[in-house]
Image (tube, grey):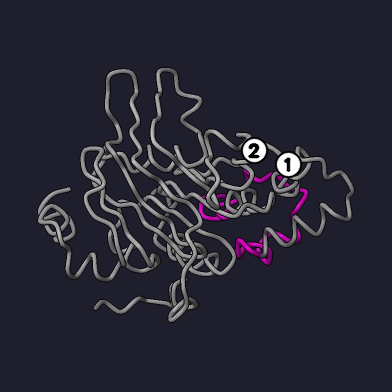
Amino acid sequence: MLTPTFIKGAEAHRGEEVKTKMEVRNLDLHYGNFHALKDVTLTFPENEVTALIGPSGCGKSTLLKTLNRMNDLVDGCKVTGAITLDGKDAYKDMDVNDLRRRVGMVFQQPNPFPMSIYDNIAFGPRTHGIKKKDELDVIVEQSLRDAAIWDEVKDRLKKSALGLSGGQQQRLCIARALAVRPEVLLLDESTSALDPISTAKIEELVGQLAAKYTVIMVTHNMLQAIRVSTKTAFFLLGEMVEAGDTDTLFTHPKDNRTADYVSGRFG
């Protein structure tokens, strides 16, 4: 088995029964006539990091956006099957705003709002009715600490977030997602636009976040999946080919298509 660079979230669960936080069952997704996801069934363990890998256009980002109904915003998108959060149907039994509060998302490109660092983090809590400054102060500090950026920005909270470096902006966006106290964090290739040093910081952060959150990440970087995830699912042409323990999937894949991809024969 491969040895992880640092301790992954699942280490805390060794020998314990791991709870399923989210589940996808028999999921099909169409954009008009295009069949983007084909009968996908997959579980996401609580307080662990699951990586979604596969070549471009294979459906992994589409699945990620389906988990918090971002695809509701796409004309002609039709979803069948079931997605559950703590056993509750995310499409039939949950308000979409509540779902998106509980299942936060960070995108590929850092996208801080054109406002102060403080106001970026306080934006979500304010929209959910938190107005008192002392409460917001606590949330802002804790969110920035959880995103491992507090020490870098604590003396410039009133300055524009657009003045931060790319890596700092991405950690700020993670802090902004954490500020509404989600239970699941979706990361859509959140390090692909960053330099190696910033990437390493985000990867270390992801390993730490799994202690509090369920993390589901899309990545093109197979070494990144090995370093930070405990479970990996491989997608190809809209189909989930194989899923399982990350180390096992990379060292002893069951499907020849998985073996070809993780060995670099295509992708």
Tell which of 6 and 215 is nearer to you: 215
Name the residue type under label 1.
Answer: Phe
Q: Give neighbour class at mark 2: few <14, some 14-19, many 20+ (Cα, 10 Å).
A: some
Queried whether the magenta region covers residue 167, the answer comes back as yes
**Residue 80 is drawn in which quadrant?**
top left
Report the residue at 17% width, 63% height from top: 253
Tell which of 121 and 240 is nearer to you: 240
Residue 194 x %, y %? 43, 52
**Residue 209 is drawn in which quadrant?**
bottom right
Queried whether the magenta region covers residue 130, the answer comes back as no
Report the residue at 30% width, 55% height from top: 233
Per the image, label 2 sits on a secondary structure element best described as loop
- State the residue position of label 1: 123
The correct choice, above or below, for 12 with respect to 193 in the image is below
Residue 113 marker: 2
2 or 1: mark nearer the eye: 1
The correct choice, above or below, for 189 with respect to 206 in the image is above
Residue 119 x %, y %? 75, 44
Dot 2 or dot 1, earlier in sequence: 2
The correct choice, above or below, for 7 with respect to 172 in the image is below
The correct choice, above or below, for 234 with respect to 253 in the image is above
Name the residue type under label 2.
Answer: Phe
Position of 150 with respect to 105 (left or right) is right
